[in-house]
Image: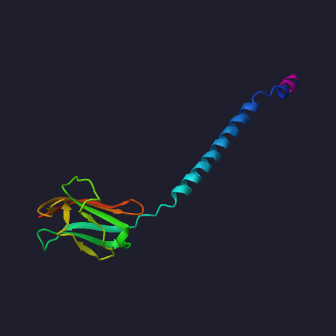
Amino acid sequence: MKYLKEFQKDQRGVSPVIGVILMVAITVVMGAVVAGFAYGYLGNTPKAPNIALSVIDDPTDQVSVLVKHSGGENIGVDEWKGSLTLGKESSADFSSQGELGDHAISTGTTLDVGNQTVTANTTIGANWYHFVAVHVGSDAILLDTNVLVR
């Protein structure tokens, strides 16, 4: 009986346990609020279209590159940008004269960029070219590939 009375008197361990539980609960609630705000804020970004693009050397022409849309969603005129630059590891420069994207693309569309100016005073010839297509609204890369023109 003596131990039971001492046990009821000595309750020093209860307060730290309740404090830890409350701190964990506050942390979880604050994390949920921050995540909800962040996802709500970033949730307005448009999604990139689901699209199947490919770039090939035009077999009927020696200085031509074809961009083919073989399936997926349609893309409007102002919804994408494309860049065709000389070399395998060129960076996409959408402000250059080689900018593409002034055409709407739907399934079955083939764009001939044969006489497109790639960079200043350079037209397509037999060489490697780097093609990048980007969705304007979401900044998602639709296609990033190299093509050999023969």
Give the image quarter of residue 88. bottom left
Q: Tell me: residue 22, above or below residue 5.
A: below
In this image, 3 relative to 41: left or right?
right
Camera-side residue of 75 and 59:
75
The magenta stretch is 2-6
For this view, does 127 lie left or right of residue 7?
left
* Residue 53, horizontal then vertical, whole percent: 30, 67
Q: Residue at x 35, y 72 (%)?
A: 77
Q: Residue drawn 30% across and 68% down?
A: 101
Compared with 64, 145 (above or below) is above
Quadrant of the rendered image containing residue 85: bottom left
Quarter occupied by the C terminus: bottom left
Q: Residue furthest bottom?
A: 108
Q: Position of residue 117 (x, y in %)?
A: 19, 64
Farthest-out residue, top:
2
Q: Is residue 4 magenta?
A: yes
The structure residue drawn at horizontal position 82% and vertical position 26%, both measured from the top left corner, is 7
Q: Position of residue 3 (x, y in %)?
A: 84, 23
Could you tell me what secondary structure mostly forms the magenta stretch? helix
Left or right placement of residue 43 versus residue 133 in this view:
right
